[in-house]
Amino acid sequence: MGRGPDGKLKRLTVYGKSRKEVAKRLAEVSAQKAKGMLPIPEAITFAEWIERWLERKAREVRPKTALAYRQDLSPFLRELGGVRLQALRPHHFREALDRMAQRGASHRAMRMALTLARAALEEALRLDLVPRNAAQAVEVKAPKDPPAFRVLSPEEVERLLEAARPERLFPAIYLALTTGLRRGELFGLKWAHVDLEAWTLRVEESRITLKGRAMTSKPKTANAARVIALGQDTVEVLRAWKARQEEERAHAGEAWEETGYLFTDPLGRPVHPDTLNHTLRRVCDRAGLPRLRVHDLRHIHATLMLRRGVSVEVVSERLGHASPAFTLAQYRHVLPDEHRAYALHLSELLSGKPRPQA
């Protein structure tokens, strides 16, 4: 087979139940070798290859993403880590996925593990380390009832805001509802990114959590770095928050830490992104609403904008999406009152005339 990276001669041994079977197998592997389709035998295991692949990925993606890759692949590493890379077959991944399902793993967990395994093995295939991508032939079927995002009606949003007013992070909730910012973008904002005279803000940083610790990162995608127009009401909320922050700076004196962040604690330190999750749960309980995640506020913003007839292209750019089609497919949720508004009489359907909008 030639010499490996260590300079040692590599041999491939072929086995069979008869001389005829061995001869046939030998002819097959010889043909594969002649076409450059037969990798040099390597003792590297799946776990060792994944470790190399993750080290390379760590130089290409954000630290939080690299950590997520490692966590998402951990079920496969537990099941298949000791299997020799070149010995992997599709049934290995199928059986590993079945065991994940038996342990109660979510559809997303199984899908992410398989997607990353495919990517890692695709690189091994390009480097001639494996003859095929063993994970490519395996599929994870989508669940019949995928989890839905919780979206509020306009009346429910008013209840949410009323319940949130006593909270320190009321301005953050208000800003999330009126801009659709991601949680990391919200807490990555600095006053230098906000122009209260021009009524705009710029998304330039994201404040994410990695193993429970907050850290600053670049925006999630190229489209995420954007300028968002603010409404007058949002500007007034931010001006009131800025005035409160100035009072806290004066009261703290030398204890104040000048970080420049929009959302800070009474001593000027940036608020940990997880804090809003706790605040939101408390607010929802107070308002008598189902508990929301911070990301649900982003979906609410998009749905209410599209419901008002705002162009999907405009909404997509506000959200920092690469495609309006993605925005429409993932962020447009039909509210109950919209169903009721179009419960038409048969005569209205047969008339062909458009119904007047309320």
Image (spheres, grey):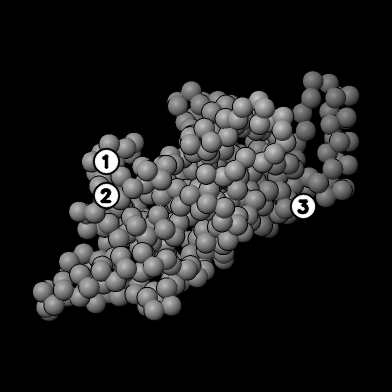
Q: Name the residue under label 3.
A: 2
On residue 223, the disc is none
Q: Mark 1 points at which residue?
A: 287
Q: Position of residue 208 (x, y in %)?
A: 39, 59
Residue 261, quarter of picture: bottom left
The amino acid on which the numbered mark 3 sits, given as a three-letter code, is: Gly
Q: Where is residue 255 in the image (x, y as percent from the top left)?
A: 13, 74
The amino acid on which the numbered mark 2 sits, given as a three-letter code, is: Glu
The residue under the point 57% across, 30% down is 343
Could you tell which of marks 1 and 3 lies nearer the N-terminus? 3
- Residue placed most toward the observer, 220 or 113: 220
Comparing marks 1 and 3, which lies closer to the viewer?
A: 1
Dot 2 alpha-carbon crowd within 10 angstroms: few under 14, some 14 to 19, many 20 or more: some
In the structure shown, which secondary structural element does the residue marked by tag 3 occupy? strand
Q: Name the residue under label 2.
A: 162
The residue under the point 66% across, 25% down is 346
The residue under the point 89% across, 24% down is 20
Q: Are marks 1 and 2 in contact (CB under 8 Å)?
A: yes
- In three-dimensional space, the C-alpha distance between marks 1 and 3, rounded to whole angstroms, equals 71 Å
The residue under the point 28% across, 74% down is 259
Could you tell which of marks 3 and 2 lies nearer the N-terminus? 3
The amino acid on which the numbered mark 1 sits, given as a three-letter code, is: Ala
In the structure shown, which secondary structural element does the residue marked by tag 2 occupy? helix
